[in-house]
Each structure stands twice: as C-alpha cells, then as structure tokens.
Amino acid sequence: MKFGVVTFPGSNCDEDMVYVLQDIMGQKVERLWHKDTDLKGVDFVVLPGGFSYGDYLRSGAIARFSPIMNEVVAHAGKGGYVLGVCNGFQILTESGLLEGALLHNSNQKFICKNVFLKPVSTTAALTKGLSLDKAYQIPIAHGEGRFFAAEDTLKSIVDHDQVLFHYCDENAVVNATDNPNGALMNIAGITNQTKNVFGMMPHPERAADRFLANEDGRALFESLLKYC
C-alpha cells in the first residue's frame, strides 16, 4: 500500500509518521505538501499531528482550506482511506469528513501524557484487528481534544459503530476519572459511516517503536494494513 503523509505549516509529527510507516511497517510513503494539488497516486492519506497554521481561529480551521484538502476530500469521497491524528483529526472535522468537533480540553490546559484506549468498533479497519478487552497505551498531546457532537449526531455515531476508541483505565474499564479532556462518552476517535476515514486524538506513531519501550500503537497500523 502506498501512503501519503501531508505536511502543513506547523505540522510536527509528519516525519514521525513517515518513519513508522516506511521504516517500521515497510510501506511506500510519499511526502505531500499542503499546496500540492496531486495526491501522487497514494492509496491512503495521513494528516499528522502538530499545530497547522499555528492553531489560529480553531485548530484545523485554516488547514481545511489548503489546496491539498480538495484532493483529500475527493479521495475520501471515492472511498479512499484517510487517517487524521490529533491535529489531523481536527482538520477532518473542520472539513466535514468526520462528524462532531474537537473543543478545548475541559481543564483549559494542554495535556501531554500516556493514556489508555479501549477499542470499540468491530467493523472499522483501524480497530478490527485489536482486542476489545485490552487497554492500549498511547500518548496524547493536545489542547483541543474534547470530542463533542449534538445529541442526534452522537446517537447516529454510536448506532453505526463509528466510535473507534474510548479513553479507559489500564484494565480497559471506561470511566470519567480516566477521561483526560472531557470528551463526550470518553470518545478518543471516530470513523465515518463508510469506514474509510479515521480520526483519533492519541498518537499511535509515538508508540510503535521498540526503542521507545511501547509498541501498542504498532497494533493499530497492523490492523490498517490487514483490513484496508
């Protein structure tokens, strides 16, 4: 599979994502610039973490208008795969490729720490290969990660098996205490109804290398490669 990793002004996780996909997972990777108007034949587009355009207005609000996003939206509309991590997730909601919004953390502070995730969806490629009973330790680093959606939208997301992960404790128990940012229903990531666009706040690329003593994130990439 050929991946394309987009770099926006202010991206800071693009090289981390390239390294994991290319050097650890052994995939072909194309670096894409935000002003590009050609996806260069990639099968899977990744919008990495960072602070695109300095997070002015709202996180992802300006990046949504970058030229490359016209191609990303068209790619997703044709069934192509897209993954947005952290700032990438924010860009996906701003562009309408995913429902809901990412609001300021409930404590109004930037949070950078390891959290635990419980996989939820049994039909999405990102979680299909994961154990639903295991807590995966993945780091977060964001100031606007509190998932929010209107009541009817949230019900639809749940009814269509679109929730990818809940924040949980180390035993995979979902509770308010282990919700780091106040996200509705402890939601850490969602997919669209057609299950080809994925967004998550935690950074799996920061937990995919044995030299970091944590490879829980690698399991997510393995699931993508198996089921996409």
Image (cartoon, rainbow, N blue to C red):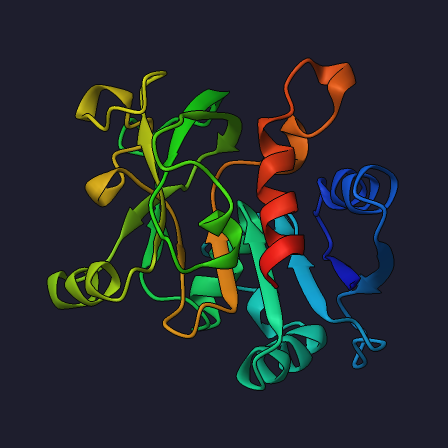
Q: Position of residue 3 (x, y in %)?
A: 77, 61
Residue at 75% of width from left, 46% of height from top?
14
Q: Is residue 118 visible?
A: yes
Q: Position of residue 124 (x, y in %)?
A: 45, 59
Where is the C terminus found, in terms of image quarters?
A: bottom right
Residue at 36% of width from left, 16% of height from top?
170
| Residue in front for this viewpoint, 220 or 115 | 220
The vertical placement of 39 against 13, above or below, is below
Residue at 65% of width from left, 44% of height from top?
222
The image quadrant of residue 195 is bottom left
| Residue in front for this viewpoint, 111 or 4 | 4
Residue at 52% of width from left, 60% of height from top?
91
**In the visual, does 37 lie left or right of 46?**
right
- Residue found at the far left of this picture: 151
The image quadrant of residue 80 is bottom right
The image quadrant of residue 155 is bottom left
The vertical placement of 187 against 213, above or below, is below
| Residue in front for this viewpoint, 117 or 104 | 117
**In the visual, does 162 lie left or right of 23?**
left
Q: Position of residue 151 (x, y in %)?
A: 12, 61
* Total count of labels: 0
**In the visual, does 156 lie left or right of 166?**
left
Where is the N terminus found, in terms of image quarters?
A: bottom right
| Residue in front for this viewpoint, 31 or 121 | 121
The vertical placement of 123 against 207, above or below, is below
Q: Is residue 49 visible?
A: no
Q: Position of residue 109 (x, y in %)?
A: 39, 26
